[in-house]
Image: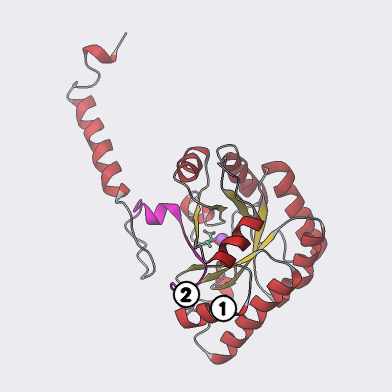
Amino acid sequence: YKRITVKSLIEMKANGEKISMLTAYDFTMAKIVDTAGIDVILVGDSASNVMAGHETTLPITLDQMIYHAASVVRAVERALVVVDLPFGSYQSDPKEALRSSIRIMKESGGHAVKMEGGSEIKDSIKKILNAGIPVMGHLGLTPQSIYKFGTYTVRAKEEAEAEKLIEDAKLLERIGCFAVVLEKIPAHLAQKVAESISIPVIGIGAGGGVDGQVLVIHDMLGMNNEFSPRFLRRYANLYDTMTSAIGQYVTDVKSKDFPNEKEQY
Ligand code: KIV
Ligand code: NA
């Protein structure tokens, strides 16, 4: 195998090869995702929802993100591992943003960081890039700002917000980000952004006109039944598979079917 780097991703875009990306938060899942051939693993702050059960991404801490990221890095041989900077670890000033990024790189072994926002966090992104740490941008629906927006509905449907998003994407490219995630925006706008910058645009709920796709692993494996946005395709129904397997185990224990003669010493 050959390790995926930020350079590989930029080459993939130039060659018209779509980029595959999924989240992972722990060793066992990351090993499966990496072995299956994914290009990029995102240790997303969606861990706050998926792993910890919080309603938003805001509560997860930098220490907790580092724990998840280190677990993922120990499993991965091929994929590029990108780690979300959590809410509160980079917004106050560029020095704090750099300090948080350095902690992620040193303590988890991740290969890049991701942060939400455009012009507002330009100075922080520059400072991190100057330290040699690759940065992935994230525009459109930015869940760390949920209390400013109030809802998780589609973003940038209006002209002014769409214009700012295009300007922000160009800015992220200009200052040196290696890729940008666009979350839940109209497909035509996402395609326009992908066509106007040369760094890869990875979409989630942003249509097929972009350079790659990302989904939350638990969602695409169908591990929860509650979250069903239009953009989500389920590739398995692990909720049912696991529930019936566990139910069968309970039945077998109760009925003394498990363990049998061969399943003991
Ligand atoms: O945290 C996350 O899972 C993400 C993806 C949805 C892009 O940021
Ligand atoms: Na995130």
Element under label 2?
Answer: loop
In-front residue for pair 87/219: 219
In-front residue for pair 68/235: 235
Residue beneath disc 1: 195
Residue 144 in picture, x, y percent from top left = 59, 66
Quadrant where the N terminus sits is top right
Residue beneath disc 2: 209
Residue numbers of the magenta segment = 206-224
Q: Quadrant of residue 134?
A: bottom right
The CB of the residue at mark 1 lies under 8 Å from ligand 1: no
Quadrant where the C terminus sits is top left
Say whether disc 2 or disc 1 marks the residue closer to the N-terminus: 1
Q: Residue at x 72, y 66 (%)?
A: 91
Count of numbered circles in the view: 2
The CB of the residue at mark 2 lies under 8 Å from ligand 1: no
Crowding around mark 1 (Cα neighbors within 10 Å: few <14, some 14 to 19, many 20+) is: some
As drawn, 64 above or below 85? above
In-front residue for pair 182/161: 182
Q: CA distance from mark 2 to mark 1?
A: 9 Å
Q: Residue at x 60, y 41 (%)?
A: 73
Can residue 243 be spotted in the picture?
yes
Residue 257 highlighted magenta (yes or no): no
Residue 221 as seen in the image, left or right of residue 14: left
